Image (spheres, rainbow, N blue to C red):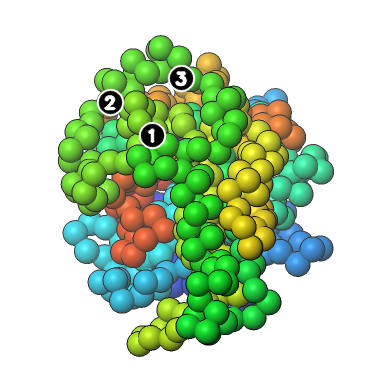
Amino acid sequence: MSSHQQTREQLLETLKDYLRIPSISTLPEHRADVRRAAVFTAGQMRAAGLDNVELMEDPEGGHPLVYGDWLHAPGKPTLLFYGHYDVQPADPLQEWITPPFEPDVRNGNIYARGAADDKGLLLILIKAAERVLRGQGGLPVNVRFLIEGEEESGGEHIARYTASRPQRLQAEAAVICDTEMFAPGLPTICVGLRGLVYGEIHVQGARTDLHSGVYGGAAPNPLQALAHILAALKDRDGRILIPGFHDALRPPTEAERAAWARLPFDERAYLEHEMKAQALVMEPGATLFDSLWARPTFEVHGIRGGFTGEGAKTVIPASAVAKVSARLVADQDPDTAIAQITRAVNEACPRGVTARFQAIHAGPASLVDTDNRFIRLAAQAMTEEWGVETVYVRSGGSIPIVGLFNEHLGIPSVMMGFGLPDDNLHAPNEKLNLDNFFRGISATARFLELAGA
Ligand code: BES
Ligand code: MN
């Protein structure tokens, strides 16, 4: 092995160091950790041989972007590599077999928060650039890296930066390593993501908490009012009842539906072993892939209010809050969706309380046209690495920057990702398959060669 080729052990040690940093972007108490992850990312980019590596601070107080480039391939295309160094919170902690920020290798997987979402996959991009750059003394294409630290909490900083259309983001295509393979050993390009509206429903009853015996029977109950509102937005069969919410749906093409039908997939195994649930609950009449990839959702994430401690307390709470979100698909407009939810909440609000929907963040869905040279070359590189034809799928998750790169920079995104469906993203025992990590580096390095040929 030549000196520029890092051993698997060296790559693994770097990944572990990265995963030890609890860069939870949504929790203020982890602000310094998020910054440490930014500094670590910049250090890796410098070590890879990139130029102009720097932390770009957010004037509005968000987490820093990390930028770096290598622009010494005149006449060749420029690729914009994206990833995120922030992670989701790790709770519930007691569910982890080993602690979330003490990476542990078991059965060919590395377990830690952020292993697959997204530090492990982001490191694949950096290490692929490093392998080609150090190994061949240069890259066959120009590259820019734009890495963010608030993808899991709304991504306001990168959104503002991208909307300003800086010269630094000039590129022919973005390359996004934040998605997964459809099945183990099956190279996959993601061509569609759902958008997202996330917010809170606030319900206010009396001005203070009330004794439920003295006032109960006559006082409004905000928690029960909230339950009525939530039930009015989605029925017990799973049908979304927000008026107008389905008006703008663009159904998948026949060709896309046919391709989905050819995917290796066992619905029962999905239910029992991946989702580990008792039944699929979809909008009546919709198929599973449509429900996950081509239809909107409305979900409740948490409800706050009243007394939830041990024992009993006879109280009517003065207020209640529900955290909710809706996934959006093409061609739903986020602002329209916010207006529709707002109206539905107001209309469902029972007598005696006030209710309002407050959006926290929103981003559009994205659909990528596969008729694109970079997507074809990425598929070729992955097909060469795994020896299997690459498939094109959508994902139900959201990566808001994909829509913004398209809108503001006019560039498509190549979403080549190396996670697996059972990686436990956002859940306890998140993992990344190490074979995918190493092969991902090789496939991405090969993609760089193909893109510059
Ligand atoms: N990497 C995920 C999205 C994803 C997961 C895409 C699986 C494809 C397959 C991303 O980091 C994520 O979780 N995004 C958030 C975005 C939100 C907080 C704005 C999401 O989807 O909830
Ligand atoms: Mn991610």
| Residue at horizontal 44 percent and vertical 72 percent from the top | 20
Please give the residue where the numbered disc 2 appears in the rendered image: 263
- Quadrant hosting residue 42: bottom right
Q: Which mark is residue 112?
A: none
Q: Is residue 354 visible?
A: yes
Residue 383 spot, x, y in % from top left: 34, 27
When the figure is inspected, residue 86 is found, relative to residue 374, above or below; the finding is below
| Residue at horizontal 23 percent and vertical 28 percent from the top | 264
Q: Which mark is residue 283?
A: 1
Amino acid found under the numbered disc labelled 2? Leu
Whether tag 1 and tag 3 are in contact, CB under 8 A, the answer is no
Mark 2 residue crowding within 10 angstroms, few (<14) / some (14–19) / many (20+): some
Q: Earlier in the sequence, mark 2 or mark 1?
A: 2
Please give the residue where the numbered disc 3 appears in the rendered image: 252
Q: Is residue 444 visible?
A: no
When the figure is inspected, residue 293 is found, relative to residue 208, above or below; the finding is above
Q: Nearer the viewer, mark 2 or mark 1?
A: 1
Q: Earlier in the sequence, mark 1 or mark 3?
A: 3
Q: CB at mark 3 closer than 8 A to ligand 1?
A: no
Residue 128 spot, x, y in % from top left: 47, 45
Amino acid found under the numbered disc labelled 3? Pro
Which type of secondary structure does the marked residue at label 3 adopt?
loop
Which type of secondary structure does the marked residue at label 1 adopt?
loop
